Structure formats: C-alpha cells, structure tokens
Image (cartoon, rainbow, N blue to C red):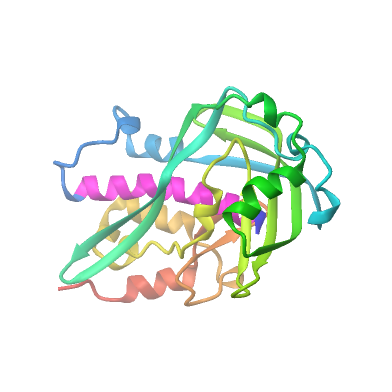
C-alpha cells in the first residue's frame, strides 16, 4: 500500500501534464501552464516526472512505537517540501461522452519550520492530538516505517523517515490509512480514486501523437494488471504505474463518439 501510494502520486503528476498537452492541442487558445512555458511537449513530460526511492521498511503493531519521538519516525521537512493543490478532476466532452481524468499539480514549496513544542513530542501525544481527534471512530492497528528519497525538477530531498498508519473504522469496518510524510504532501489523494485515463483512450484526444505515445509507453503488461478494474496498475519495484494493456486495447477498439 505504501509503494502504491508513491507510485500513483508520480503517475498523477505526469497525467496532469499530458492532460494539459492534450487540451492545448485541441484548443490553441488554452494558455500554457506557467511551468510549461518555453518547453517542448517532451520536456514538459520529463519535468513532470517524480522519482521516489523507498527503503528500510519496518512493519509492526502501532502500540510498539507510541513511546517514541515523532521526529524519529516522521522527519521534519528541510528547506522545501513537495506539495500539491489537491487532486484535480478534469473532463473532456465529446458527442455526449464525458471522459474524465484525475491529476496532481506538484510543486516545491518552502517547508514550514518545526514548532519547538513538537520537537520532543511522542507519537502517543500526536496520536491523541491529531489522529484520534480527526478520526475518533478509527482503531489504529499497524504501522509501516520507512525511508524516502524524492527527486523532482532537479531537486532531491532525503533520505528521510516517513510513516503509514493502518486501521479500520470501528463503526463501519472500512479500512483507514493515514500517510505521515512531512516532505511529500498529498499521498492520500493518490489512493482515493480509480485513475484510468478515459479521455486519452476513448475520445479524439487519443489521436494526438504525444498522447498516443504516452499511453503506449505507460501501458502495463496483461499479466500484472487485472482487466476491467478501471484503474491503473503499478510496478511496485520500480514505482511506476499505467493503464493495463488489455484495457487500453479494449478502449482503443471502441469507435469514437459521433
């Protein structure tokens, strides 16, 4: 689950740019985004790539780490942090068909300084003040602690420590996940929705060479990707995601809306 979150985060950053390129090609009046001015399509796609390296995993019972300092397991951001403006949803309409795609706009932002009163706080205190207050019906059970190195637009941070908490809603029984990464913000957004790029497979946007090449390059093998899930599949060793080859082929075989 941790690896899936980071892999999908990186995929959503690229999907934002491919969406911009697709819409820009169909409507020249659409302005180029600020971070794409003066760049070719290939350069814009390359710039959107976020690279993560995850290592040193430790998994266990949440109760085993509650007496530890929070900063020992959740490293404060230093200098800059990778932030998003929240998950964006777009839709391309064609002859009555609304074909959506989701994305994340990622940027480096100044890191917030660590408040002095937080430096020595224990995870148990953080648990009581934040996690239990925000989700009082959640029973936290397991954790995954690990190290992260992130690279984006020529800048890197890490290795630093981050944490995932796993539990369930005591009322409804649903799984609940809480990422705690102080340097990469927005991981929980990457896990919420299905990410299959309908607009780039089912509409005339698929005829754009840049879009077609990107979809082709991103396809995941049929062996590793269940058919018909309407989502992307991820290579969790390389932390790369893309739509399944069979789902893409089935989508491209459908006639365009008339």
Does the stretch in magenta take in 8?
Answer: yes
Q: Is residue 70 visible?
A: yes
The residue drawn where x is 18% and y is 51% is 26
* Residue 181 x %, y %: 63, 42
* Residue 60 x %, y %: 82, 57
In depth, the one of 114 and 31 nearer the eye is 114
In depth, the one of 72 and 241 nearer the eye is 72
Look at the image and tell me in which quarter the N terminus lies: bottom right
Q: Is residue 88 above or below residue 151?
A: below
The residue drawn where x is 32% and y is 62% is 100
Q: Main secondary structure of the magenta part?
A: helix
The residue drawn where x is 20% and y is 63% is 93
Q: Is residue 73 left or right of residue 195?
A: right
Q: Which residues are magenta?
A: 3-25
Question: Where on the picture, by quarter, is residue 107?
Answer: top left
In depth, the one of 151 and 203 nearer the eye is 151
């Amino acid at each position: 689950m941790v690896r899936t979150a980071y892999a999908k985060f990186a995929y959503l950053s690229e999907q934002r740019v491919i969406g911009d390129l697709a819409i820009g090609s169909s409507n020249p009046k659409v302005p180029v985004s600020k971070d794409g001015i003066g760049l070719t399509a290939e350069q814009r796609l390359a710039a959107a790539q976020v690279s993560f390296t995850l290592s040193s995993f430790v998994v266990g019972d949440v109760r085993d780490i509650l007496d530890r300092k929070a900063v020992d397991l959740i490293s404060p951001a230093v200098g800059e942090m990778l932030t998003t403006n929240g998950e964006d949803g777009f839709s391309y309409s064609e002859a009555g068909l609304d074909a959506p795609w989701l994305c994340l706009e990622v940027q480096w932002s100044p890191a917030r300084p660590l408040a002095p009163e937080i430096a020595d706080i224990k995870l148990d205190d953080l648990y009581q003040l934040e996690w239990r207050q925000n989700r009082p019906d959640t029973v936290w059970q397991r954790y995954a602690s690990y190290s992260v190195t992130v690279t984006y637009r020529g800048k890197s941070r890490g290795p630093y420590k981050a944490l995932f908490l796993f539990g369930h809603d005591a009322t409804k029984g649903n799984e609940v996940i809480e990422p705690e990464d102080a340097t990469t913000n927005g991981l929980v957004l990457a896990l919420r929705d299905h990410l299959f790029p309908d607009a780039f497979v089912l509409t005339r946007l698929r005829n754009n060479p840049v879009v077609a090449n990107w979809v082709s390059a991103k396809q995941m093998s049929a062996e590793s990707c269940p058919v018909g899930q309407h989502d992307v599949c991820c290579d969790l060793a390389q932390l790369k995601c893309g739509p399944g080859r069979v789902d893409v082929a089935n989508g491209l075989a459908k006639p365009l809306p008339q």
